[in-house]
Amino acid sequence: MSTAVVEKVDDDLWSAIGDPTRRRMLDLLLIEGDGTATTLSQQMPVTRQAVAKHLGVLDRVGLVRATPAGREKRYRVDDAQLARAVAQLSSVGSAWDARLRRIKRIAEAIQHTQQD
């Protein structure tokens, strides 16, 4: 991976997204538009307290934004931060594609030399 790509990648953001429970929460919030720890926990195999902790992680990295809703907070996906995450993933994917093409060329050259 080139230095330029490494500098663009936000490790905290990807650590937050790396958890399957948090990815499922993001999916639910994207589908439903918003939700609370209570409403999300009703659709997941974890407790409300666990959901609240996961939402806190997503909030710290900016993937969700919370607004007060009575005694709870209502969470919504931050579209700009999600777009930033997608752009980073695309950039890393492109760097790996280029690396794999180079490895393939080297392997083909070695195979060609061995055949001669």
Image: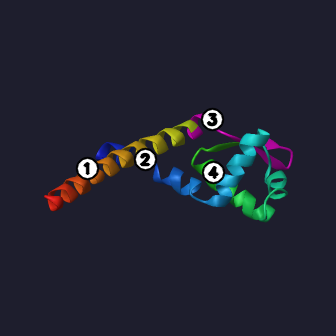
| N-terminal-most mark, 2 or 3 | 2
In the picture of the structure, the residue carrying the numbered disc 4 is: 58
In the picture of the structure, the residue carrying the numbered disc 3 is: 79
x and y percentages locating residue 33 in the rendered image: 77, 38
Task: Give the SS element for disc 2.
Answer: loop
Give the numbered dot on residue 105: 1
Type of amino acid at the residue the image marks with label 2: Val
Type of amino acid at the residue the image marks with label 3: Asp
Relative depth, front residue between 5 and 49:
5
**How crowded is the residue under tag 4: few (<14 C-alpha within 10 Å), some, or many (20+)?**
many
Give the numbered dot on residue 9: 2
x and y percentages locating residue 7 in the rendered image: 36, 46
Q: Residue furthest front?
A: 116
| N-terminal-most mark, 2 or 4 | 2
Could you tell whether 113 is left or right of 54 in the image? Answer: left
Q: Is residue 108 magenta?
A: no
Could you tell whether 107 is left or right of 47 in the image? Answer: left
